[in-house]
Image (tube, helix red, strand yellow):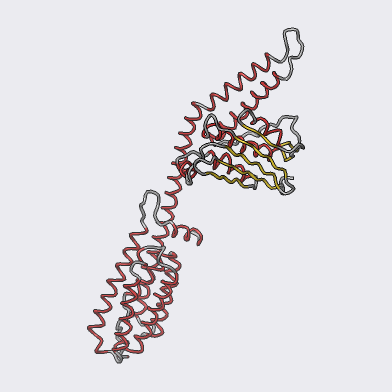
């Protein structure tokens, strides 16, 4: 596991479903530190009269007690147990070992007397193991071991024995925690894939029962009407009506294939653009389709040219806003579309005189799964590098301002 993986696992110690193997280990480390402190106090109480400077030992153990109690909650989980806390913990352990060599009787040290922190030092190594894995446990255990050899009796048999036990325990716990994090990350990814698959299947059923059948019907009827109206019984052309129906059927077929590919996770087929479409397209011409007796369009007298993909996406966002007016503003509400062609950007404003909506209504709709504004409007403008702003208040209608910069779309 890399350092990045370890960091990510620390940030998400609880796996999907709220279960975790790591957190119980952290609680055990926290409990161990408290019990090890009690053992250190008891050992020193039984032997402090043999120390050369017993008061210094009591002062150290008092500081150790305050630190242990203050960091009990910090050692209950990886988020609160920061590297600063662990560094301070290691400093206290090394200080206690050095003080043991200065305050204890040399004869007791040569006979293998325990240091002031005794087994409390193991809690520090376990903390490093939980935070960074077995490598950090080995590093912190080595620092403690070197301090113990240099300041408390040299490389004696007891020292070497204790150091080896400390390193083995720390590295073992660190390795177990790394495995737990990797297992939890794998389980979380598997549950996410399963949830996404179930949602895809549910949407596929709903789409198949409705949208795909409608698109297939439009494609079939468009082809039939296009062929039927392409010429009159005498063989003379009947105008552009047949071509329009055929084009509508073709577009419906392309959308059906793209939607099926999206449902099955396959590659979305490229949509073939009509040959008549040029590199640039007049946005005003695209917006005229939305004008009727309720919707008024105000546009410049000259074409508002944008690249065809950008113009199509912006027009689709305007269409989504107009659709919201028809569905939510009321059957007697009116709306106005204002198209502004500026040197640096193209702005389209859609305003209606409907009832409007209260603040927070869009957020509630998005949480409920109605993504018309967030996806059909804001999502399209975000893809174009533009902005979509909505303004509304109860009784004051709704105003949508869509702005696409010309830079990058020239």
Outermost left residue:
46
Establish if 11 lies above or below 317: below
Question: Residue drawn 48% across and 61% down?
Answer: 7
Task: Please indicate, yes or no, whether residue 314 appears anywhere in the rendered image.
Answer: yes
Left or right of 272, for residue 145: left
Image: 144 above or below 332: below
Counting the numbered discs, the total is 0
| Residue 209 locus on image (x, y percent) | 49, 26
The image quadrant of residue 260 is top right
Q: Is residue 344 left or right of residue 164?
A: right
**Residue 25 or residue 58, whichever sits in front:** 58
Query: At x 36% / y 55%, what residue is drawn?
Result: 20
Image side of residue 171 versus residue 272, left or right: left
How far from the left and from the top, in percent, is residue 167?
Answer: 39, 71
Q: Give residue 317's quadrant in the image.
A: top right
Quadrant holding the C terminus? top right
Residue at far bottom of view: 52
Q: Is residue 153 visible?
A: no
Residue 276 drawn above or below residue 5: above
Pick whichever, 251 or 406, lies toward us: 406
State the residue in front, 377 or 41.
Answer: 377
Q: Is residue 256 left or right of residue 114?
A: right
x and y percent of residue 66 in the render? 32, 77
Q: Quadrant of residue 306?
A: top right
Q: Position of residue 81 (x, y in %)?
A: 40, 67
């Amino acid at each position: 596991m890399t350092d990045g993986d370890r960091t990510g696992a620390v940030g998400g110690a609880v796996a999907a479903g709220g279960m975790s193997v790591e957190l119980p280990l952290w609680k055990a480390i926290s409990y161990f530190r408290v019990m090890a402190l009690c053992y250190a106090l008891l050992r020193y109480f039984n032997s402090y009269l043999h120390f050369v400077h017993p008061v210094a030992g009591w002062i150290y153990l008092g500081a150790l007690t305050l630190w242990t109690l203050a960091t009990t909650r910090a050692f209950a989980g990886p988020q609160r147990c920061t590297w600063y806390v662990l560094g301070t913990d290691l400093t206290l352990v090394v200080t206690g070992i050095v003080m043991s060599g200065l305050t204890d009787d040399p004869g007791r040290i040569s006979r293998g007397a325990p240091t002031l922190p005794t087994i409390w030092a193991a809690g520090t190594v376990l903390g490093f193991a939980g935070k960074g894995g077995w490598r950090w446990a080995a590093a912190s255990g080595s620092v403690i071991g070197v301090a113990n050899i240099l300041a408390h009796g040299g490389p004696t048999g007891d020292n070497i024995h204790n150091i080896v036990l400390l390193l083995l325990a720390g590295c073992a716990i660190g390795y177990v925690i790394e495995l737990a994090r990797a297992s939890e990350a794998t389980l979380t990814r598997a549950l996410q894939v399963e949830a996404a698959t179930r949602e895809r299947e549910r949407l596929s059923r709903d789409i198949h029962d409705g949208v795909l059948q409608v698109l297939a019907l439009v494609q079939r009827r468009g082809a039939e009407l296009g062929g039927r109206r392409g010429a009159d019984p005498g063989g003379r052309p009947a105008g552009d009506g047949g071509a329009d129906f055929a084009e509508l059927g073709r577009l419906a077929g392309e959308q059906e294939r793209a939607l099926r590919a999206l449902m099955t996770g396959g590659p979305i087929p490229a949509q073939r653009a009509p040959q008549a479409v040029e590199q640039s397209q007049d946005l005003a011409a695209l917006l005229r389709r939305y004008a009727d007796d309720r919707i008024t369009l105000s546009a410049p007298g000259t074409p508002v040219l944008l690249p065809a993909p950008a113009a199509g996406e912006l027009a689709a966002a305007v269409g989504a806003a107009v659709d919201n007016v028809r569905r939510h503003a009321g059957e007697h509400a009116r709306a106005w579309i204002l198209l502004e062609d500026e040197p640096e950007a193209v702005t389209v404003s859609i305003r209606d005189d409907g009832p409007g909506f209260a603040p927070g209504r869009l957020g509630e709709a998005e949480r409920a799964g109605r993504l018309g504004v967030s996806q059909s409007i804001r999502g399209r403008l975000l893809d174009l590098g533009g902005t979509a702003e909505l303004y509304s208040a109860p009784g004051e209608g709704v105003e949508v301002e869509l702005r696409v910069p010309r830079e990058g779309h020239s």
